[in-house]
Amino acid sequence: MIFASDNWAGASDAVMAALTRHNSGFAPAYGNDPLTEAVTQRFCDLFEREVAVFFVATGTAANSLALSAYAKPGGTIFCHAESHVAVDECGAPEFFSGGAKLVALAGPHGKFSPKSLSAALARHDSGDVHHGQPVAVTISQATEAGTIYSPEEIRAIKEVAASRGLPLHMDGARFANALAHLDISPAEMTWKAGVDVLSFGATKNGCWCAEAVVFFNPQDAAQFGYLRMRGGQNLSKNRFAAAQFEGYLADGHWLDLARHANAMASRLADGIHVSESGRLAIAPQANEVFAVFSSEKIAALRAAGAVMHEWPSDGLEAGESMVRLVASFRTSREDVDAFLALL
Amino acid sequence: MIFASDNWAGASDAVMAALTRHNSGFAPAYGNDPLTEAVTQRFCDLFEREVAVFFVATGTAANSLALSAYAKPGGTIFCHAESHVAVDECGAPEFFSGGAKLVALAGPHGKFSPKSLSAALARHDSGDVHHGQPVAVTISQATEAGTIYSPEEIRAIKEVAASRGLPLHMDGARFANALAHLDISPAEMTWKAGVDVLSFGATKNGCWCAEAVVFFNPQDAAQFGYLRMRGGQNLSKNRFAAAQFEGYLADGHWLDLARHANAMASRLADGIHVSESGRLAIAPQANEVFAVFSSEKIAALRAAGAVMHEWPSDGLEAGESMVRLVASFRTSREDVDAFLALL
Amino acid sequence: MIFASDNWAGASDAVMAALTRHNSGFAPAYGNDPLTEAVTQRFCDLFEREVAVFFVATGTAANSLALSAYAKPGGTIFCHAESHVAVDECGAPEFFSGGAKLVALAGPHGKFSPKSLSAALARHDSGDVHHGQPVAVTISQATEAGTIYSPEEIRAIKEVAASRGLPLHMDGARFANALAHLDISPAEMTWKAGVDVLSFGATKNGCWCAEAVVFFNPQDAAQFGYLRMRGGQNLSKNRFAAAQFEGYLADGHWLDLARHANAMASRLADGIHVSESGRLAIAPQANEVFAVFSSEKIAALRAAGAVMHEWPSDGLEAGESMVRLVASFRTSREDVDAFLALL
Amino acid sequence: MIFASDNWAGASDAVMAALTRHNSGFAPAYGNDPLTEAVTQRFCDLFEREVAVFFVATGTAANSLALSAYAKPGGTIFCHAESHVAVDECGAPEFFSGGAKLVALAGPHGKFSPKSLSAALARHDSGDVHHGQPVAVTISQATEAGTIYSPEEIRAIKEVAASRGLPLHMDGARFANALAHLDISPAEMTWKAGVDVLSFGATKNGCWCAEAVVFFNPQDAAQFGYLRMRGGQNLSKNRFAAAQFEGYLADGHWLDLARHANAMASRLADGIHVSESGRLAIAPQANEVFAVFSSEKIAALRAAGAVMHEWPSDGLEAGESMVRLVASFRTSREDVDAFLALL
């Protein structure tokens, strides 16, 4: 009963098979190989426009390098207070951008509103060099709270960003989970809603080590080859990333994986909701469930084999804790039901 | 006839099999899994002492992060003028160290002498803040010229470094090739000769994406977990790197691969040496051959299917160029002989 | 009626005289001169202990370099949300520290409580590399809201910091104003209350360009000479800073200047308090007054010659604005009374 | 007999008088004052075109920030091996540029040739991200060896730089000394010869603390306000710098000061040349004299009161050392003659 994180699973069989399939012979290094070219074209098809695609090894690198493409001296980046870039990347966005300041916006359930963005930007409005200069806005989709922005919500955030000339970045560490939930096209969830650059995560949802930075305005990527190389992220055997993406994206495999993870999370949530021993903290929309139990219950679940992380939360009653339960492509219905049977 | 680079090959069958073998079930992320623990122990056994081991995704990251562990403000790092850190990493060592200056030392065949190091250090001797402060010395083993430092040569360099209290870093992108040539133990080629920190490369010699930073004095790694995370190199599914290393290091597989590559390079060199249409620029010791041909000959070789890079060189005659021929674990005797037949 | 900022005044006559007095002959550059040595000793006497003192050109440099002396990868620095380091230094603290994250703490009137610091630190408590590592706590004295921490309040903050092994930095851009108000010794307001490093500002209170970083534990300054030089802050004619400090610190001149500025601010505040056309937003303790007026009143004051900045504020009624009025050593009673007469 | 450095002198009387003259009343901070505006116009007149001018506190800051205005990821900057930016700034250019690599060019007497620049650029010619990207060329005028580039030499260097689209920076720490020697206009020595950005040094030649970064293409300075503020170089009482420049530039005062310093250096050189106890290492053109004496002679000169630095030099005979003798605006004929009398 492993619900610790979706990165506790390995690679899906199809991804593994693609990796094996492309492991013969020789291919030019550093992405100058035919497979990388083909997968790049696959991304263009997927997003229904020309995109510039760069593979990197981690989601932290994807986010940090993507944001650094828009860095300026004294730059400020607007993000959610609980976002991965703000609290889980050890200052990598600050480091790669030469010291940008991340301005943390509050908001329930991992999402901030256009209004709170607008208010924060108003505090950075002077053109006075003392206050630095806004350079980007970033959202996570799905959010770190397991919720999802609708395309309309994304567009509303972009409108505020655009009023200040700012690009919108999307941290898509769980892009597939969000897309499977919304059941819209990749284009609709990104550039058609105003996203300029995307961290397209595939590792959590069935790859070993496959993250892509996708620029919807390829001219924004003019310096990105240098940024990536200087950042130690130019994979020499780049086809190993390309092969994973080929297997991942073929025949809707990636969305099948995400739908399964979402369904398992949904099943978990439903079971918790009807149980008498806990309650949902947030209505889940992707593959993460945040639930509140008594500390005794959590101990009992763990004793019975459940693996899950406790999560900080305000507004709990004494003796309660919040846990995060994450489902992945590899989570089985049996494990979910075994967990629910313990409630 | 692919002699462009050893990173044009994919992964060896044994490495691929290890990766497949460990792709089931769940394992803790970020290196807290049993396989990573076992492979870490494997490194300790290999080097006959306790070491601190950190996996990263690229050789550039390994070098840059390893050196950054010793960074100080105004730091200077002493390296060979043709070393990978100096000319092939897009300033990553400078970037990750917060702006260190790489002091380039000349020397024939990719190696610098203790004397030239000593002379350079003498120019940085004042304790005057204007001149910054030496923080590290780095050598490549095998070198970028396909040559190899003997343990005695390494020890002599370390003696100069130690006289200034400086650690010695080894860029082991082709560590196995050097070790196979010298036929000594990993300990003898590293810490017993004075190496403090090693970039242990496995990607070029049969892995997909597997590099390790090995600290021989684990206390030097006190901040390295943070440096790696901030550097975007903390692999979430870390076992995918561990699995590659497991397959790579098992039963001497890595040295078998390196011996084959070295043998193929040696065969190439011998054939060129006896041919009438070219000459060796440097006597090869690892898996790289630098040879001089007429431009016409190079064109003819390429037309016949040979893939290889031209390399900058001083002291050529008009109409000549130098090429680099790299053999890998996957280079076949047939390809070597076909190439030689063209001479 | 200039109340825009205390840095609109030039240098005091005594400071100017000292600068002129020391402008003859030759003196070693970069602080190796007898005057710098004498002024350094003056700092030791002033603080009743051995201190390490470094002159720099701006308060932003003093703060950023002081904090960078404690930088580590993924470092987090805890400060007030309205502090100069957080909102008025264009990301310099982030830049000089290699990308530290400033964690903004809320709190009324420019001060944060030990409790809010404790709560924020608890969110950075894991030892998990993802969250980075706390490296310093910083307070401003006087604060940017014109208020002052008591020594007991400073000590309480330091106790929380010390429980995590963190140094306490004090931004003393208006150090003299705070000290004059509290009427205690420099030692009592700093290291005796737990301060480890101080940005000792003299520019705002009567110098041209004189800021000092004062380390109360000189061993913390081991790398500071390099940090300052690399930061472009090693003044070649360092005696020009030393001379200003000599004039500034002689015979209590600096506290006379500050007492005057504080008294003028107090007179302004009293007049506003009893007037019918505005109200004090914060009870002033140093040389800054924050007052709320109707927009019409502000326009009228300006039309009559008053120079002052509007300041962001929550909780105003429609048609109101908050202004900041700053008194300096040069502010005259006549100007204050002329301003009050307009109310 | 102080010949240690030109920064051992204080400020000239005229500069000091200007500083005193402008020390009354109030003036807007951070350069928004009328005096700064007037001095900016003075720079435009001086250079016979619109320029963007920014004051900073040190020459190291001027150089580092000027170069950082052209920084790109993986950037390489081409400079002389003995230049101040390369060996005397503690890595500040690397730090402020986010890790640029300074490529050191050799050349006799502190100058590099267009040919050596061309050869170095050819090694950075590939467009391959591994090698980074050239971003700027920098020369010192006068050089650190006391020599001077002619306008034709500057133009020839710029032609090579321009062939790669690179800006040319001039480190003018001793700008006045060079200009006085060449006896041409400031425009002829800078933008008319191809200089894009200048570190205009005034500190060494008679100011306390006055350095300016001058952009001849103001659009290059678009981000410079932020770079300077983030770099801790935005002087709050900016008029103190402006006042120094006003006094410095008025009525040709600056060139009078430089002509005196140059004449004293020339007198020193002539005396050494005809003496029997030493020899000139380089024919001086500005205010620095490099001379070789026996170690015994140097000891004797010092015992008699001469203050001077030894300087590293190749090609000395045993028992010899090279010293640097620097004349400043304050160097007296008496001191020069007293020194010469000792020879």
Image (cartoon, coloured by chain):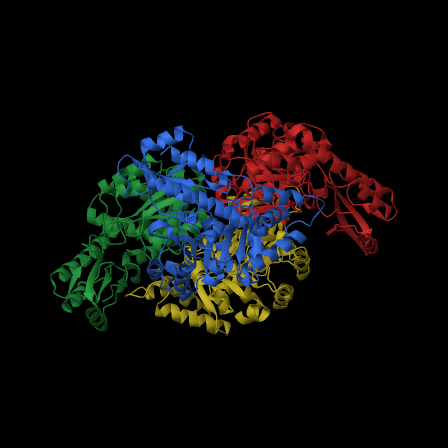
Chain colours: A blue, B red, C green, D yellow
Q: Where in the figure is residue C158, as x and y percent of width and height?
A: 29, 39
Side of B283 where C176 appears, left or right:
left
Q: Is residue D184 visible?
A: no
Q: Is residue D154 visible?
A: yes
Q: Is residue A182 above or below residue C163?
A: below
Q: Which quadrant holds residue B260?
A: top right
Side of D111 where C168 appears, left or right:
left
Q: Where in the figure is residue C82, as x and y percent of width and height?
A: 30, 53
Side of C321 where A298 appears, left or right:
right
Instruction: Please state the total of marks drawn on the protein image.
Output: 0
Quarter of the figure with the N terminus of chain C: bottom left
Front in this rendered view, residue A291 or C98: A291
Residue occupying the point 54% across, 44% down: A206
Front in this rendered view, residue C160 or A176: A176
Q: Where in the figure is residue B147, as x and y percent of width and height?
A: 72, 39
In the displayed orientation, state which residue is furthest to the right: B276
Quarter of the figure with the C terminus of chain C: bottom left
Q: Which quadrant holds residue C195?
A: top left
Q: Where in the figure is residue B166, as x and y percent of width and height?
A: 56, 36
Side of B165 where C11 appears, left or right:
left
Q: Is residue A322 above or below residue B99?
A: above
Front in this rendered view, residue A19 or C198: A19
